[in-house]
Every structure is written in C-alpha cells, then in structure tokens.
Amino acid sequence: MPIKAVLLTFLVVAGMMTAPPSPSRAAERVRIAVSNFNVTFLPAAVAAKKGYFRDEGLEAEVIRISAPIAVISLINGDLDFNMVFGSSVRAALRGLPVKVLASFIDALAFALIAQPGIKSVKELKGKTLGVSTFGSTSDVAARIMLRHYGVDPEKEIKIIGVGRDSALLAALKEKLIDVAVASPPADAQGKNMGFNILAKAYDVFRYPAIGLAATDKKIRERPDEVRKTLKALIRANRYMREDRAGAIQVLMEWARVDQESATAAYDGSAPVFNTADGNIPEDGLRLLIQQAKKELKITREVSLTEVWNPTVLREAQKELRINGR
C-alpha cells in the first residue's frame, strides 16, 4: 500500500518538526513514523527542533500514522523508520523482514487511577476497569499490573474499552468505571480530581515501548543512514534527560498543549526515558516477545535475534563515545 494512498486518512505531517537540510551539503531525506504527537515520541521532536538530524546531514520528516499502516508502509519502502516498538516486534514475529534497533522509552508510564474509595489494587476484584481499546498497550500494562498484585484480569475484573485518556477520566467522574489505566498527564489530572493512583507500570515491569525499527533491507543497504538517525535520536534522548525546561518547551510546541499539561506529561514520563544509550533492555524485550507470541498464538521458541539487530546501534554508540550497557 503506497503511502500516498494513506495520506488522506491516516497521516499528518508535522511540518514544524521537519528538520531543514544543511546548506553545505545535500541532505538525506528520511521518513520516521510516530503514532501520536505527545511525550511518548518526544525524542523525534527534540532531534528535529534542536537540529540533531541536521547535524547528521538528514532531512527528517516525522509522520503521524497508525501503527498497522506504518508497518505496511515500512515494508513497502514508503517509510524509512517506525518508532512504535510493539508493532515492529509483532511484524518480525509474523515473519516480516523488520528489526528493532534501539529503545528510547524503556518502560511504560501507565497508571491505575481509581475511585476515591479504592485504596489498593487488591480491592479491584469484582470491579470494572476502563482501557483505551482491547489489546492496546494500556490494556497489556493493566493486565500485567493486576497480575503482579494478585488480581486475575481474566476472571476477577471486568475490562471495557472506553477510548482516549480524556474519555477515561470522564468515565471515572461519572462513575461508569471503577478504575482506569492511563498515561501522563492523565495521572496528574486524575489525582487533582480526587482519584487515587494505585500503581504505576514502571514500578512493576520493564517494557520497551518506543524506539526505532527498520527493514532488513534498509539496515543492509543503508547502514550509514540508520546510524545517523540513531545518533540523532540518542542525542535527543540525552537532551530530554538533561534539560527539563527545554524538553517541556519542545513538548508544548510538538503536542500543542499548555505549559501545565506539558510539565505534567514530562514529569510523569521522565522515569521511563532511556538512559541515553539507546540499548534495549533484554528483560523487557523478552516480556514483549512473550506477550506478542500469546497474541499471535505462536508456541515455538523465539530468539532475540529474530526481532532485534544491535549492530548499527553499537556503531552509533562508538561514534558518540558511549559505552553501551
């Protein structure tokens, strides 16, 4: 499916986040897929806004597109990179020639937000949980948290799809659900509304959510382009950790939100930012693979090398003088 056929319904180009080419050399144009303009994909925004793509001789076009369409467009060569980790891993497990290369969000910032009368996760037995959609990352995160605290999500709680975080908070307010799983800044907003934060995913498990993926062909034929893109994004991730005020300012422009919302989103997500080396946490990757196998009904053993190619990342780290974990 060519990307032109997708543009009208699935794709929005972030014009302000297209890094201009350097006047001294011809820039390589790369298209990078994100599924939203929010704090989750902030490394792409920072790399563009702070000129890190330009420093590498890249003209980066950051494109908002649904995860399933991004995978299709990646395989067809209409996109160069995909930042949604889970969809890329599932594509690799289905036998598609895709590999994840690096991680920029090493865990999930989702929180369980409950009605004022509920004080612990164990009290959720028999209650109703709201998630965005069934099978979404928020759904997966909620189920893992519930199991961790001794609640069986299959038997002891009712799960319904509600929609976006704003809809989840509205459902809580109207007492249509007992608990919701949502990401920053919804946790801070929920707390201000009098709801209780019962648990946060990053306190329970690691789960790489955002990174960089490319096709085997791209890695084989354009390794320099891959390496340059990785370098720009690693620098962006480092900036996000070191300059809170600067990152919040970029987020305000990127997500088109006010300073209060951007600050809450940043502070709620900062604990899951990568340690600025791009390495993928193996325990988190194994958990993601395990979850994907269950979804795809795969029973065979899956090695990390089926979904992960760390070679170019090591080269990027070397050029940046980073000692990878």
Image (tube, rainbow, N blue to C red):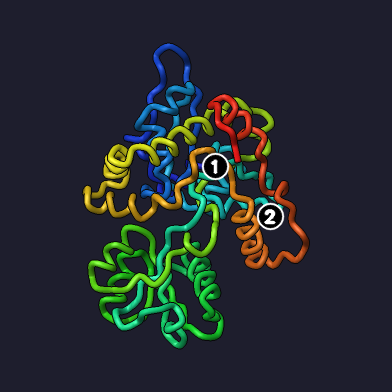
Q: Is residue 239 visible?
A: yes
Q: Is residue 9 visible?
A: no
Quadrant of the image containing the C terminus: top right
Residue farthest to the top? 24
Q: Amino acid at mark 1?
A: Leu
Q: How many marks?
A: 2
The Cα–Cα distance between marks 1 and 2, rounded to whole angstroms, is 16 Å
Q: Look at the picture and state if 314 lies above or below 110.
A: above
Mark 2 residue element: helix
The quadrant holding residue 283 is: bottom right
Q: Look at the picture and state if 71 lies above or below 19.
A: below
Q: Foreground residue, 137 or 2? A: 137
Q: Foreground residue, 309 or 91? A: 309
> Is label 1 or label 2 in front?
1
Residue 212 in picture, x, y percent from top left: 54, 42
* Crowd tier of the residue under label 1, counting other residues whose Cα lies within 10 Å: few below 14, some 14–19, many 20 or above: many
- In primary-sequence order, the first of circles 1 and 2 is 2
Q: Give residue 93's mark.
A: 2
Q: Look at the picture and state if 316 lies above or below 305.
A: above
Residue 236 in picture, x, y percent from top left: 43, 35
Residue 311 in picture, x, y percent from top left: 67, 35
Residue at left 39%, top 43%?
42
* Crowd tier of the residue under label 2, counting other residues whose Cα lies within 10 Å: few below 14, some 14–19, many 20 or above: many
Q: Amino acid at mark 2?
A: Leu
Is 181 on the left-hand or right-hand side of 247?
right
**Which residue corresponds to mark 1?**
212
Residue at left 44%, top 36%?
238
Mark 1 residue element: strand
Residue at left 44%, top 78%?
121
The quadrant holding residue 244 is: top left
Residue at left 60%, top 27%?
318
The quadrant holding residue 227 is: top right
